[in-house]
Image: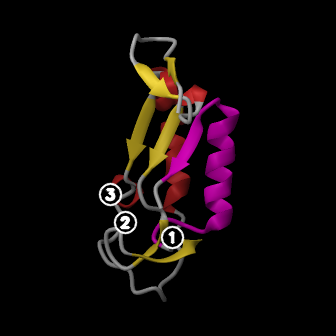
Amino acid sequence: APLRRSMSSTRSVPSSVPRWSTDAIFYQIFPLGFLDAPHTNDLTGPVIPRLAQLANYYSHFEKLGVTCIYFGPVFESLTHGYDTVDHFKVDRRLGDLDLLKKVVKELQERGIRVLLDG
């Protein structure tokens, strides 16, 4: 693929890389740890809306100049998140799909993009 220059540096990046990402300021969050979720998931327990706690950090992200949040695993898993058992369900220790959509919408309204690690 042809290369192009990043706006903020002299390094070349493949043209397949989204243009917005070449100058983005990323903030990575591992939600299960960041939001103090239990280490194991029995897949039958209650849905705990821990993702809602992220709203407490929105202004902090903005002050840092963050333009993209990169979330570690958010999908249903048994332990640490990287052992996903269902890529179509948000881990019940974090909330549900409606809550994830709400968080993504709120971040986007602040000009912050969201990337999910599957």
Observer-nearest residue: 17 or 67? Answer: 17
Q: Is residue 116 left or right of residue 103?
A: left
Name above or below for residue 32 compared with residue 44.
above
Q: Residues within 10 Å of mark 2 (few under 14, many from 20)?
A: some
Residue named by callout 1 = 48
Nearest the camera: 107 or 12?
Answer: 12
Give, as a single range, the part of the protein colored magenta: 93-116
Please give the label number shown on residue 10: none
Q: How is the image coloured?
A: secondary structure
Is residue 112 visible to the viewer in this orientation of the structure? yes
On screen, residue 49 above or below 105: below
Q: Residue at x 56, y 43 (%)?
A: 114
Q: Which residue is mark 2?
A: 37
Which amino acid does the dot numbered 3 rest on?
A: Gly
Indicate the position of residue 1 as horizontal and vertical percent values: 53, 33
Judging by the rendered image, the residue that carries numbered circle 3 is: 33
